[in-house]
Image (tube, rainbow, N blue to C red):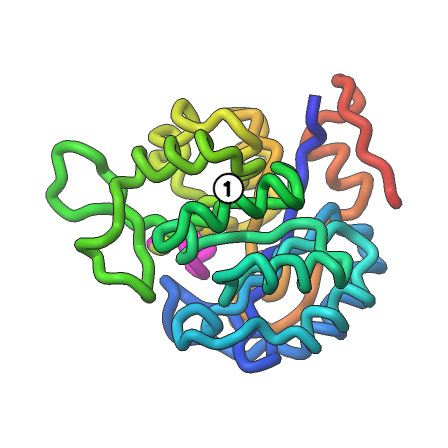
Amino acid sequence: MLNPRIIPCLLLDNGGLVKTTNFKSPKYIGDPTNAIRTFNEMFVDELIFLDINASKYGQEPNYALIKKLSSECNMPLCYGGGLKSLNQIEKIISYGVEKIAINSAAFIDTNLISEAIKIFGTQSLVLSVDVRRKVNSFKEKYEIFNVCLNKSKLPKLSSHIKKMQGIGVGEIIVNSVDKDGTMSGYDHDLIDFLKPKINVPFTILGGASDYKDFKDLYKKYGLVGMAAGSVFVFQGQYRAVLINYPNKSEKNSLFNCQKSNINISDK
């Protein structure tokens, strides 16, 4: 049985950390290296870094920054943003980054995904997909959102998930555009819609308001990947920047570890 993972997802924008709301209005929250050092002290399960502008503006990944972040990171690291070639993926993995998140490239070049899986292994390739609720739809309630591609060129969410699993991605991260940065709770309807369609480790992102949301997700769905942004970088009603993360005792309490075979330990 896989242990539950509580995963901070941090957004990179021109070398700094930002937090968005509904994928808009990025707010600067600090230096990514300082954030990693703080999370190291908190024994975080894993970190996700997503560059929100690399793919949007056709930029190369910031290799110097990624190399620096990986060298500082004491936990597994996943990176996504601006990736469109095997050479790029190989270079970033050579820095010690354990997972590569592919989003826009999955629509443009499926051969890139399959070739990368052959070379680096299923566990190294993660599908990242941004999703929003459809308006006045009686069929699929959700659709893929992508700032790089015309909406007409995007596949249906269900078929995209099915195709990428067939190719062999090792994990799927689903980010709710509607819930991003709102701290209003996860979109349980979205999870209900997707979970029966996903047969690889599934990480949900967007909307976490407090640690109890992680407990509810695990209790209801048995999800092993629970990602969030705002809840780990903001504190209080005025959203003051303060990095936080549940300690070992809090995590044990959230997942009732004393009553199960789950073993959560500090690294």
Residue 154: percent from left, percent from top = 26, 50
Question: Which of 238 and 173 lies nearest the eye of the viewer?
Answer: 173
Q: What residue type is labelled 1?
A: Ser
How many numbered circles does the render carry? 1
Please give the range of residues in magenta.
178-185
* On screen, residue 117 above or below 253: below
Using the rendered image of the protein, determine whether residue 243 is visible from the camera's viewpoint. Answer: yes
**Residue named by callout 1:** 114
Say whether residue 119 is magenta: no
Q: Residue at x 31, y 55 (%)?
A: 145
Whether residue 184 is in magenta: the answer is yes
Picture coordinates of residue 204 (x, y %)? 50, 42
- Give the crowd class for mark 1: few <14, some 14-19, many >=20 residues within 10 Å: some
Type of secondary structure dominating the magenta stretch = loop
SS at badge 1 = helix
Q: Please, is residue 2 above or below residue 5 in the view?
A: above
Q: Looking at the image, which is closer to me, 100 or 221?
A: 100
